[in-house]
Image: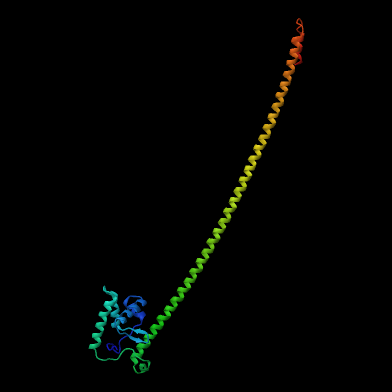
Amino acid sequence: MRNDIQSNERAYSSKEVAEEVGIATPTVRKYGQILERNGYEFLKDGDRRIFVQSDIEALIALRDTDKPLDETAKDLVDQQKEKLTGSSDTEIAVPDTYENLPYDPNQLKEFLLYLGNELAATRELNVQLTNDMTQLKTTVARLQQDHHVISSSIGNSSQKTHAKIEKLTEQQKIYYEELLQQEKEKNEFLQREIQNLRKEQQEEWRSQNEFNKRLEKAIQKPKGNLDWLFSIFRKT
């Protein structure tokens, strides 16, 4: 049992030790476990450690060591044993049992201070956890909203693209139909022109054929009178 603590020595909570040493509260617990594993003695209230100045110095030594933590912890345990061996019995800052608390006002004061600090640290942690949970819920809600917006945007964009494709397809269809109609009209016009040319050619062939027949008949008549020759051209 520790006997190196003065009756009026201040007790520190884990949160206060973390601020004093400049490490996180979980690291304080980790260092405490390493020290206890190697034989270090802490004042305790049940399972809770109560820190005094010498304990803070031990934690600082662990924080700044270049050696393995267990090796440093063993050195600190040896130093503590030497102090405990060379120290006379003194009153401790916090009693071992609740039955002794009313008989030592200084220890009771320190113990109540310790409990108050631990309670404040617990409340602060609960508030931080509540804030973190609220922030997490807000973030999740925002992400869900962003996902909905993105999905809606993608859906709207897809619909617009599909509508544009349908419109372009319809315009292209109309354009091709107009071209086909124009080509059809051109073809019909050319067919009519060809038919007219054929009729004109047939009429020209028929007229030429009749002229040739008349000329042949005229040539076969007796010579001496040229009126028959002029009559042929007059008829034509």
Q: Is residue 145 visible?
A: yes
What residue appears at the point 66 percent right and 34 percent down from the top-left corner?
187
Give the number of callouts: 0
Q: Dividing the picture into quarters, in which one does residue 172 lie?
A: top right
What residue appears at the point 34 percent right and 92 percent down from the top-left corner?
105
Q: Is residue 177 left or right of residue 84?
A: right
Residue at the far bottom: name it: 103
Its colouring scheme is: rainbow
Q: Position of residue 191 (x, y in %)?
A: 68, 32
Q: Is residue 18 visible?
A: no
Report the quarter where the C terminus lies. top right
Q: Dividing the picture into quarters, in which one does residue 195 lie?
A: top right
Report the quarter where the N terminus lies. bottom left
Q: Position of residue 201 (x, y in %)?
A: 70, 24
Q: Position of residue 192 (x, y in %)?
A: 70, 31
Residue at the far front: name it: 220
What residue appears at the point 39 percent right and 85 percent down from the top-left corner?
116
User: Is residue 104 or residue 196 the one in the foreground?
Assistant: 196
Q: Is residue 19 above or below residue 107?
A: above
User: Is residue 126 or residue 41 the one in the foreground?
Assistant: 41
Q: Is residue 21 above or below residue 232?
A: below
Q: Dividing the picture into quarters, in which one does residue 85 lie?
A: bottom left
Q: Is residue 184 above or below residue 196?
A: below
